[in-house]
Image: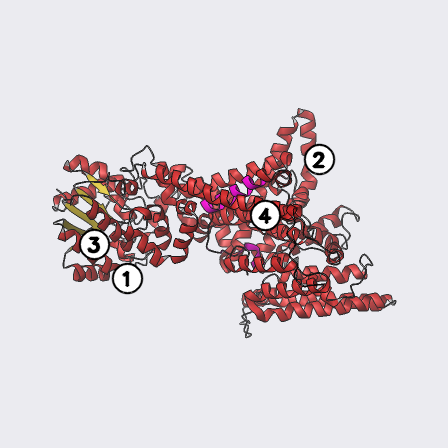
Amino acid sequence: MIFNSLPFLIFASVFFLLYFQVRGRGRMWLILLAGYFFYGWWDWRFLSLIAFTTVMDFTLGLYIDRSENQTQRRAAVVVSIVMNLTFLGFFKYFNFFADSLATLVRSLGMEPSWTTLNIILPVGISFYTFQSLSYTVDVYRRKLPVERDFIKFAAFVSLFPQLMAGPIVRAYDLLPQMSEDKKFEWRRWNSGLGRVLWGFFKKVAIADSLAPFVDQIFAAPETFGSLHLLIGVVFYSFQIYCDFSGYSDIAIGLARMMGFRFPENFRTPYFSRSFSEFWTRWHISLSSWLRDYLYIPLGGNRQGVVKTYRNNMITMLLGGLWHGANWAFVFWGFLHGLYLILQRLVSPIWRSIVRVLRLPKFVDDGVCILAVYTLTLFAWIYFRAGSLGDASFKVANQVIMGILSGEQFSFGAIINKFQVLKGLLLIGILLTVEITNFRWNWNERQLWNPAWRMAAFAALLWLIAFFGTFGSNAFIYFQF
Amino acid sequence: MPLFTFNFNPYIMKHFIWYAAFLAMLFTGDRLAGWLLQRETMASQFRYSQLYSGRAGADLLLVGNSRGLTFYAPYIEQATGQSTCNLSYNGLPMDVANVLIQDYLEHYPAPKTLLLDITMCDRANNELLAGFAMYAPFSPRLSGLIQDSLPKMWGGNQFSHLTRFNNEIFQRALFHRRKSDKDWLLDRVISPKLVVEVAQHQYPLEVHPQLVAQLQVAVQAAQAKGVAVQLVISPYFPGFAQHVSNLDALKTAVEQATGLPVHDYRQALSDPGDFGDFMHPNRAGSIHYIDLLRKDGLLP
C-alpha cells in the first residue's frame, strides 16, 4: 500500500479511528495487525519474511541478554547479523552477483552454465532489516535493555509509517516509546497532519510533476540538447529529494499523529557546504546507521589518514550498494567516498584562499554550496541511470557528454517548455518554503493559531489539486 | 474498560468546529479559484478557448496532431486571403479531434474546407484528453468522452474544480492570454547529428480501427454541412517515412472508411533544412508544404 493512494486514505481513517480507542496490549496488537495488513496489501507472501526476522531477532535478543558468556553473546549477535544480511543479500543481490560473475567468466572466454533466479525484491527489506538488526547489536552492546514482550517487539518492527521506506528508526529510539501510553492530543495531531500534507505536496505535486521530464531524458539522452539535459538532471536532484523526503515527512507526520517521535531524515541537504555536512543532512537515518554500525567499528577517523580514507570509501561503497544491485549505485557510492576524501585535501586550501582574499561569508558559503551541489548532481546522474540495468553506465555517460557538448544550449531548443516552467515554479515554491522555514518554522507556527492552520492546510491542498499528479506513483525508495 | 468511548467535551468540540470551518473554506476556495481560472481561460486567445467562447469562426478548419501545426496559419491566411482555425495539438488523437470538429460544426457556420492529417488515428492519448477537462463544462461531447475514458479523473474534477486546470493545456491557455497562438510551430532546424542517424530511428505508428471510425464520423459530419474535406499525410524527414511502420495500412484503412482519397505528402520535401526533427517540418518546410497543398488544389 502506498501513501498516495485511495486505499491508504481509507486504511488510515479506520486505523486512527480505532487507535485512540484502544490502549495497552490492544494497541500493540492493532499496530502489529495494521503493519502486516499495510505490508500484505503489496504482497502477503513476504509477510513471512518479516515475521521470521522478528521471531529470530527477538529470540536472539533474549539469548544475548541471558548469556553471561561473552563468546556466546558474540556468537548470537553474529548469527543475527548473518541472518539479516543473508536475507538482504539473497533477495536484493543474488541476481546482481550471479550476473556479474557470469560476465566475468565470459570475459575469461568461458561460458557459465548456471541459470539465474527471478527473485522479487521485497519492498522495504533494506529498511526493516537494518531496523531489526540495530536491536540485537544494541542489546549486545548493552546500550538497550532487552525487550521481553514479543508483541511489542513485533509492533516495533512492523510499525507501518516507516515500514516501506524508512526512516530507519533505531530500537533504542523507538522501543521505549512503544511502552508509553499515548493519549490523543490536538497539538500533536495538527503538527503531524501539517507534516503529512507537506510531504504529500513534495511527493505528489513536485516529485511526480518532475518525473516525466526526467524519465524522458534518461530514456533517450541522444535526442536532447545540452540545456534540456542539464535541466533534466537538476530536476532529478529535486525529484529524488522531494520523493524521498516527502515519504519521510509523511512517515514522521503519521507517527507524530500516533504519538511517536521519529528522528528527522532530511535537513535541506542541498544547502550543505561540505560533503561531510551533506551526509548529516541527507537520509540521516541511513548515514547515521552506517556511521554507528560500520564506519566507527571499522575505526572511523581514529587510526590515521590512510585508514580514515579507507573507512570513508568502504562506508560509501556499501552505502551505494545498499541502494540497489547495480554497479552504477556502487559507482555513485564511490564518487561520494571520493568527494569525502578530496574534501579533506581541498578544504584547507580553500580556507587559506578565503583567509587571504578576505572573502565575505556569503561568498564563501555560496561557493561551497554550489560546489557541493554540482558534484552531487554529477553523482546523481549515475544514481538515476542505476535503475536502467545493463545500460546504466552508457546512459549516464551519454547524459554527461550531452551536457558538456554545449550543443543547443538555448531555451528555444527545449521541447517541453511548459513542463520546465512548471518544474521551476514548483522548485521555487519548495526553496522559498525551506529557506523561510529556517526563520519562521512554519509547522510550529501553524500550531499557534487555528486560522493560520486552516489557511496553511487549505493552501497545501489547493496546491496539491492544482499541481499534483494523481496516478498513485510509487515512491522511488521503495525499490531500495 | 470499554473498548470504545466517545467523550465530546467543549474543548474537543471547538477543534471539530475549526475542522468543519476548514472543510467549508477548502470547498469554497476550490470553487472560487476554479471560477476565476475558468474566466481567465475563456478570455485567452488560445485555440480551444476561442473555440468554446464563440471566437473561432473561419473559412478553413485545420486539424492534426503536432504534425498538424505544420498548417502554418499566418502563411495560409497571407497566401489564400482566407481566415483559418487550427485545432491541432501535440499528440491530439482522433477521438478528441472528432469532438472538437463536431463542436465547431455545431456552433459556427460551416467552413469551406476541412484539412485533416490522418496520422491522428495513430493512438489514443488519455493524458492529453485529461487536459481538456477545463473545456468540458462547455461541451457535453467532451464531458461525455472524459467521463467514458477517464471515469476516476472525471470524478476528481467534480470533487475539486482546481484539478481541471492541472495540465499543460491550461498553461498554454494562460501563456496565450494576450498573445495569439496562430504562429505556433516547431521552428528549429534538425541537428546534423540526427540527420546522420536517420536510418537508426523509427516510429511505430499504430492503426486503431476505433480511431479510424472516429475520423469517419468527423468526415461525415463535415460533409453533411457541405464542407470540402481534404485528408492528408504531412511530410516526414527525407528517408524517414520508410521507418514509420503501418503508414500504408493507415492510408488504406482511412480511404476505405471514408471513401475519400488520402493525399500523400510523406516524401514531398527533400531538403533536410525544412525539418525540425524527423516528424515535423519547420517554418520553411511548412511554407513549402502549404505551397504544394495550394498547387494541388487542396487549399484555395
Mark 1 vs mark 2, foreground winner is 1
State yes or no: residue A39 in magenta: no
Q: Earlier in the sequence, mark 1 or mark 4?
A: 4
Q: Earlier in the sequence, mark 3 or mark 4?
A: 4
Provide the residue designation for mark 2: A348
Quadrant for the C terminus of chain A, please: bottom right
Provide the residue designation for mark 3: B218
- Classify 10 Å Cα crowding around label 3: few (below 14), some (14-19), many (20 and above): many
Which amino acid type corresponds to the residue marked 3 in the rendered image?
Ala
Q: Chain of mark 4?
A: B
Is A458 situated left or right of B144 in this image?
right
The spot of residue A81 in percent (x, y) is 73, 65
On residue B208, which mark appears?
1
Mark 3 vs mark 2, foreground winner is 3
Is A368 situated left or right of A387 in this image?
right
Q: Label 4, label 2: how many angstroms apart (C-alpha)?
A: 58 Å
Q: Point out the residue furthest to the bottom here.
A: A113
Is A480 situated left or right of B48 in this image?
right
Q: Nearer the viewer, residue B69 or A430?
A: A430
Labels 1 and 2 positioned on one and the same chain: no
